[in-house]
């Protein structure tokens, strides 16, 4: 009897290990696609993929996190294309997945808090003047929480640099200061090590992009 129980346990462990490696493989493949997505449609497709993974791996927070991140990136593409009127819907989708991720990972997760900041920022851009005191303040609050939870996180440094870079000077922004902060973000990227191969590791390329711009473009 003990022999059969041992055999059953070994089979169960093998199946669990196989399922885990299969999950990691498909997640790695989808995460790699983040760098190749260019259009809003690309990011929507990727968000759908992560959502399907999350429905099967309901105890894992990262599929919901990456689904939210894909929606946020979709929104940033739309913002670049001037489609501000559609950002509320995209932010709502991101927030739905972030709520799921936070339920699994807990409230003290800096990566999730940072994405919540980015989702609120998308909402604010629908009408910055009217929404700064609501969505803008919520975005700042989430950023401050993320900073306290993980001050060495390079993605937090990156988003702070972006905020300074794109904010008009009359409202406290500065492209020169922003570029200095992008350099600080790169320093943090050099020192930061994700907890696992699936954990968030995006952002370095964006910091490098801003630092590669001609000086006259950055002014």
Image (cartoon, helix red, strand yellow):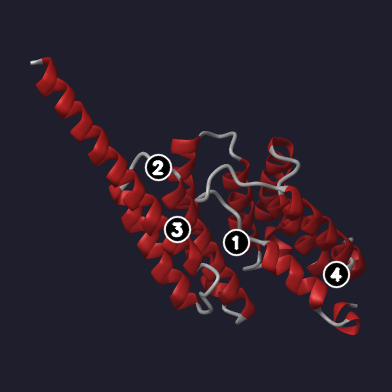
- Cα–Cα gap, marks 3 and 2: 14 Å
- The answer to which of marks 1 and 2 sits earlier in the sequence is 2
Residue located 53% across and 78% down the image: 38
- Cα–Cα gap, marks 2 and 4: 40 Å
CB contact under 8 Å: marks 1 and 4: no
Residue located beneath label 3 in the image: 28
Disc ID at residue 123: 1
Residue located beneath label 4 in the image: 168
CB contact under 8 Å: marks 1 and 2: no
Q: Is residue 183 left or right of residue 142?
A: right
In terms of secondary structure, where does tag 3 sit?
helix
Residue located 84% across and 61% down the image: 183
* Of 157 and 196, the residue lying toward us: 196
Task: Locate the C terminus by quadrant.
Answer: bottom right
User: Residue 180, how many percent across, how many down?
Assistant: 89, 62
Q: Is residue 9 left or right of residue 17?
A: left
Residue located 65% across and 67% down the image: 125
User: Residue 114, how many percent across, how many down?
Assistant: 63, 49
In terms of secondary structure, where does tag 2 sit?
loop
Residue extending furthest toward the left: 1
Task: Locate the N terminus by quadrant.
Answer: top left
- Cα–Cα gap, marks 1 and 3: 30 Å
CB contact under 8 Å: marks 3 and 4: no
* Of 190 and 72, the residue lying toward us: 190
Taking 118 as reference, is 57 above or below it? above
- Cα–Cα gap, marks 1 and 2: 27 Å
Residue located 59% across and 34% down the image: 108
- Cα–Cα gap, marks 1 and 4: 19 Å
Neighbour class for label 3 at 10 Å: few (<14), some, many (≥20)? some
Residue located beneath label 2 in the image: 60
Look at discs 1 and 3 and give the one toward the viewer. Answer: 3
């Amino acid at each position: 009897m003990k022999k059969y129980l041992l055999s059953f346990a070994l089979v169960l462990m093998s199946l669990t290990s196989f399922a885990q490696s299969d999950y990691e493989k498909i997640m790695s493949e989808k995460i790699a696609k983040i760098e190749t997505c260019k259009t809003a449609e690309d990011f929507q497709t990727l968000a759908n993929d992560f959502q399907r993974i999350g429905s099967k791996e309901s105890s894992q927070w990262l599929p919901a996190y990456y689904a939210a991140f894909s929606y946020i990136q979709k929104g940033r593409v739309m913002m670049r294309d001037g489609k501000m009127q559609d950002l509320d819907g995209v932010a709502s989708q991101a927030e739905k997945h972030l709520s799921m991720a936070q339920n699994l990972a807990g409230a003290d997760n800096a990566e999730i808090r940072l994405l919540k900041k980015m989702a609120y920022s998308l909402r604010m851009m629908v009408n910055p003047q009217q929404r700064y005191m609501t969505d803008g303040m919520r975005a700042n609050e989430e950023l401050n929480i993320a900073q306290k939870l993980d001050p060495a996180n390079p993605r937090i440094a990156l988003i702070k640099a972006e905020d300074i870079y794109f904010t008009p000077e009359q409202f406290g922004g500065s492209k020169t200061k922003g570029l200095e902060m992008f350099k600080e973000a790169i320093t943090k990227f050099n020192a930061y090590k994700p907890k696992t191969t699936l954990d968030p590791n995006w952002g370095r390329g964006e910091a490098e992009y801003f630092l590669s711009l001609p000086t006259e473009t950055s002014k």
